[in-house]
Image (tube, rainbow, N blue to C red):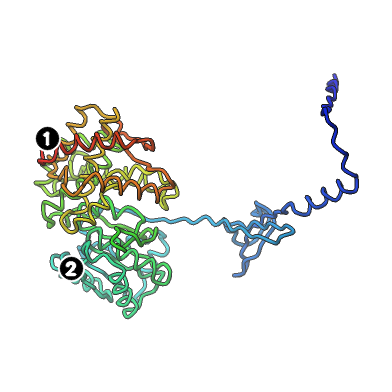
Amino acid sequence: MERAEEPLTVNTPEICQPAVPCHQSLENSTMANLNRPKETVFSLVQVKGTWKRKAGQNVKQGIKGRVSAAKIYESTSSSGTTWTVVTPITFTYTVTQTKNLLDPSNDTLLLGHIRDTQQLEAVRSNTKPLKRFIVMDEVVYNLYGSQVTDYLEARQVLYRILPLPTTEENKSMEMALKILEEVHQFGIDRRTEPIIAIGGGVCLDIVGLAASLYRRRTPYIRVPTTLLSYIDASVGAKTGVNFANCKNKLGTYIAPVAAFLDRSFIQTIPRRHISNGLAEMLKMALMKHRGLFELLETQGQFLLDSKFQSGMALEDDRIDPASVSTRVAIETMLEELAPNLWEDDLDRLVDFGHLISPELEMKVLPALLHGEAVNIDMAYMVYVACEMGLLTEQEKFRIVCCMLGLELPVWHQDCTFALVQKSLRDRLQHSGGLVRMPLPTGLGRAEIFNDTDEGTLFRAYEKWCDELSTGSLR
């Protein structure tokens, strides 16, 4: 059955306007069509080394040659032509937990970043010696320099080792340029000879920045030697140096080709630096993993005493606190970083403890280590969460007791309310006008908040100072 036509309804205004002449209406319509942009999408196909545009979204069928995932959108109007380039950029990098990294029989340090099996076999069968430029923190060099040298010589590598004082005070563009000068003099292939960074987070950050600048992007490898860098700096894509008295003000998002993690390095760092790393581990526990929190709560002292060396000889890592805690910390960190490597989404749970700590850390440098400043920030934010009704008093008490058990500071006299206010104002400026405050909503879960009022922040601050200013719960 045919559907009956709906009646035509004409609305007639009470006051009639003069009709537009037909020729004027046609002229307006023609102008509108001329001004409407005409868009064409082009795919890109490479044949015999030359890239060519091919009209259409999907040109793979019947096309001989290499088709790029990139697209060019051409838009033409009376005002001109615009080309919009959409290029998917994929970074692939590996994070490998390994043992005996400096054993000459272990080729992970030199070849572990190569994922293509044919390329790997070609390198192994090539008689030409490998060439590597290595930057080491000078403290690490004093401890492991001879082992690294023995390793490289045993494998007949052409090498240059550059020891540097990579401390937070020296984390500058000048340090990065010094590395670049040495790399330039040594000479490396920017595709096949990655720069190797061996040290703590500061060393990895500076070398990463230098590598990202050299020939616009030279591959580099991270070998963390502290707990903090093991679970934090080594697994992400950030590089950077301090600038204008601001932490990591200059930097890039360029991931290493690989990070090689060997827990045996941690045995030679001071106890305070192990606590320092535990702060970042606790951050991930509070944000994402109740089981990790409970492990740190019950096994924290054991991890400090054993310097994360327990289980190094065990076949089954699943029962060892050091193995379990580091694995979970890395997995939860990668879960947050991998889908947001360039921080296109500014709502980031991993920013917990990093709203106030950068300002505090730079203000009192070098009195506080990075993880210590982060923990002071987290301790205050736990009080904010409790004041907002997100945490119970019992949960707050458990968290602070865990922090103290990990031998971390929970308060600092230089963390004034004025500093809190300034830090959050800066946060608004650099986070799209929203504070984007990650807060725990229980043990091992969290959300992002933008509606925390100053009254709540001040009441939390007063309670925080009243209860923790002596360094212990009153």
Q: Secondary structure at mark 2?
A: helix
Label 1: how many residues lie within 10 Å, few (<14), some (14-19) or many (20+)? Answer: some
Q: Nearer the viewer, residue 50 or 337?
A: 337
User: Does residue 71 appear left or right of residue 241 in this picture?
Assistant: right
Residue closest to the far top: 1
Tell me, for residue 141, which label it has, or none: none
Per the image, the residue denoted by label 1 is 473
- Work out how far the residue at label 2 is from the one at label 1, CA to CA, in angstroms: 39 Å
Q: Amino acid at mark 2?
A: Glu
Residue closest to the far front: 15
Q: Nearer the viewer, residue 439 or 232?
A: 439
Q: Position of residue 57 (x, y in %)?
A: 65, 52
Q: Position of residue 263 (x, y in %)?
A: 19, 53
Q: Is residue 108 visible?
A: no
Which quadrant would the C terminus be assigned to in this image? top left
Q: Position of residue 455 (x, y in %)?
A: 30, 34
Q: Position of residue 460 (x, y in %)?
A: 24, 35
Which quadrant would the N terminus be assigned to in this image? top right
Q: Nearer the viewer, residue 211 or 357?
A: 357
> From what the image shows, is residue 133 above or below residue 372?
below
Q: Nearer the viewer, residue 403 or 363?
A: 363
Q: Amino acid at mark 1?
A: Leu
Tell me, for residue 138, which label it has, or none: 2
Could you say which quadrant of the image residue 380 lies in? top left
